[in-house]
Amino acid sequence: MTRLPAQFVDRLRPGIRDQQVCVTGGAGFIGGHLVDALISLGARVIVLDDLSNSTPSHLADLMDLEPDKIRFMQGSILDPSALFQAVEGCSLVFHLAAVGSVPLSIEDPARTWVVNATGTMRVLQAAHRAGAKRVVYSASSSAYGDAPALPKVETMAPEPMSPYAAAKLAGESLCRSWAACYGLDTACLRYFNIFGPRQAADSAYAAVIPAFVRKLLGNEPPTIFGDGEQTRDFTHVSNAVAANLLAATHAEPIGGRVMNIGAGRRTSVNEIAQRISFILGTTHLHPDHQPERTGEVRDSVADIGAARSIIGYEPVTDMETGLDSTVRWYSEQHAASGDQKGQRS
Ligand SMILES: NC(=O)c1ccc[n+]([C@@H]2O[C@H](COP(=O)([O-])OP(=O)(O)OC[C@H]3O[C@@H](n4cnc5c(N)ncnc54)[C@H](O)[C@@H]3O)[C@@H](O)[C@H]2O)c1
């Protein structure tokens, strides 16, 4: 379960309790943590996910615990009838479903555009038709591209450098225009490198933290693309969850405004590798350096002033605390899977 500070939970509960809400992409990494929090705050949650990049195992556990609070629909946001059924009767829609990988978007830009841009338009149309109060959209810091100015502020001109970034940025424009033209309130949360338990560690497109942990747990060298001095604002998933809940319960219209959601601190990939190695007690870290990847930005860190002033966002977990608990979670999973293998053999 995603842990949020008690005072924070008490403040948000009245705005979430007894609401029927839809989470697209709720079987995924961030979506699963958001669903945990929504259920613990007393919402009734409908998840629409086509499982193209997830499994239903976490949701199945939640359904065992809270069968009346959660309904899972396996389907695509591109299927109008599934989408309509999912959002019908919902006051809030959290839109997270997306093709989430930069390298995959370069391999298959058409699919990325259809799911991330057209799919977002379909979600907005369906939410409007269903009479939802607000759509909270998971946007991406990749919209900033590679401009050197730091920290990234929402007033900077976007410079998407990959089909993924371009499609996620189009989603923001759609959110703003639906607020302007149809009176459907929307909020766009530009996440900066979210990490935490349950983030996929075993795909070719795995994010840097789970990819490093997996390699180190398997006694293999972690792969670093480029010199490793590229920096990111590594942000624990509880912060993304907190931002979604704050945006959803905000009393005033948000009008499609874009807000950076990060921890507000820059850490290099090399430093992350060293920290993970230290937490795991790995003595010799010899990374395998590979060429820099196309479409990846050099440096990134969020200015979180807009989210602070608009929705009262503050990071609830800092990078070090979040990394420590995340690495320990992967380590426990690894040990448990080893135990199971041992029992079978
Ligand atoms: N993880 C990050 O660091 C990060 C950073 C910036 C933005 N985001 C955004 O946050 C959101 C969630 O990301 P995540 O890291 O949890 O990724 P994820 O891949 O774990 O979750 C996305 C979910 O969407 C589902 N999905 C994909 N296409 C779908 C479709 N057509 N219909 C229904 N479901 C579909 C997938 O099966 C998956 O469960 C995405 O919109 C992503 O672009 C994530």
Image (cartoon, rainbow, N blue to C red):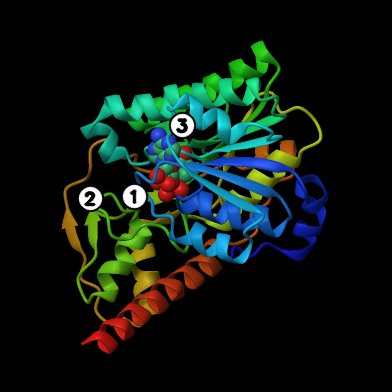
Q: Looking at numbered disc 1 in the image, what kind of residue is underneath it? A: Gln
The response on whether ligand 1 sits within 8 Å of label 1 is: no
**Nearer to us in this view, 233 or 240:** 240
Q: Secondary structure at mark 3?
A: loop
Residue positioned 56% across, 65% down in the render: 64
**Nearer to us in this view, 127 or 276:** 127
Q: CA distance from mark 2 to mark 3?
A: 36 Å
Q: Secondary structure at mark 1?
A: loop
**Nearer to us in this view, 329 or 298:** 329
Q: Which mark is residue 299?
A: none
The nearer-to-camera label among 2 and 3 is: 3
Q: Secondary structure at mark 2?
A: loop
Q: Which mark is residue 230?
A: 1
Q: Residues within 10 Å of mark 1 (few under 14, many from 20)?
A: some
**First of labels 2, 3 by sequence position:** 3
Residue 84 seen in the current view:
yes
Q: Residues within 10 Å of mark 2 (few under 14, many from 20)?
A: some
Residue that carries the numbered disc 2 in the rendered image: 226
| x, y percent for residue 331 | 39, 76
Residue that carries the numbered disc 3 in the rendered image: 77
Residue positioned 53% across, 65% down in the render: 322
Q: CA distance from mark 1 to mark 3?
A: 34 Å
The response on whether ligand 1 sits within 8 Å of label 2 is: no
Q: Residue 20's quadrant in the figure?
A: top right
